Each structure stands twice: as structure tokens, then as C-alpha cells.
Image (cartoon, helix red, strand yellow):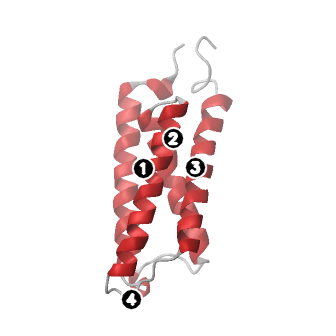
Amino acid sequence: MPRLIRHPQIRLLAAGAAIGLAALIAIYSLVPASETPAPHLSDKIKHFAAYAALAAPLSVAFGRSLRSAILAFGVAALFGIGLEIAQMLGDAGREGSLLDITANLCGALIGLFMAWILGRAWPLFGRDGG
């Protein structure tokens, strides 16, 4: 049985999910913090979780090769760095920080790792032929 995760419609769905998540991350990163409905958790945990959630569908959308994983990480990383710069330049009372960028990058790595584990652990997503 071929891998379901390689099916073009699944990859397209993953791309749509990544775009939707990226839009939500951008909105909640650029509005004043007092206007976000997020739970009262550490800011770094929110960054970590958001970029893990973004990187996982990106890795599915780009494919299962090492090159694709690097591309997915690069897109998530540049997106996170860009938003931190936008926070520094914006006037919504948000501050960009290197610690936020670090949390973004760590989250993206874990998201890629989780997608890789999923691809190896579940038979439907796992090796070709069973």
C-alpha cells in the first residue's frame, strides 16, 4: 500500500492547513497582546506550540525527503523571524525578541520531528508495502 501521506490531495490539504495556521500566527503576533484570546501561558510556550503546529503540515506539504524537511524548517524559520522583525517595527505594543525566535525555531524542529515520527509509526503513513 503506498503511503497516504504522499497522496497529492493530502499534501494539498496539509498546505492549506499550513497557510491557515500561518495566517492565525501572523494575526495573533501582530495585534496587541491584550487583544489575543490565548490562555495565560508563558509567551515562549505559545511560540513553541505555534511553530510546532506550523512546521508539521509544512513538512507533509513539501514531501518526505530531507531536502523537503530543510525547506519546511526554512519557511517556518523565516516566517517566525519576519514576524519578530515586524513586531519590532510595528506600533501595536509588541516586542520582537531573540528568545521568541529561539522558541519559534525549537518548535519548528519539534514539529518536523513529530511529523517524521508519525510517518514512521503509523502503518497507513509508514513504509511502502506494509
| Residue located at (54% from left, 77% from top) | 39
| Residue located at (47% from left, 56% from top) | 77
Amino acid found under the numbered disc labelled 1: Val
Element on which disc 3 rests: helix
Given this view, does label 3 or label 2 mark the residue nearer the observer? 2
Q: Which residue in the protein does label 4 denote?
A: 93
Which numbered disc covers residue 70? 2
Q: Which residue in the protein does label 3 denote?
A: 111
Mark 3 and mark 2 lie on one chain; the one further toward the N terminus is 2
Q: Are marks 1 and 3 in contact (CB under 8 Å)?
A: no
- Above-or-below relation of 52 to 56: below
Q: Which residue in the protein does label 1 denote?
A: 75
Q: Residue 101 in the image: state x and y as whole percent.
A: 53, 67
Amino acid found under the numbered disc labelled 3: Gly
What's the distance in space between the residues labelled 3 and 4, CA to CA?
A: 29 Å
Element on which disc 2 rests: helix
Q: Residue 3 in the image: state x and y as whole percent.
A: 52, 21
- Is the residue marked by circle 2 packed among few (<14), some (14-19), or many (20+) residues within 10 Å? some
Mark 1 and mark 3 lie on one chain; the one further toward the N terminus is 1
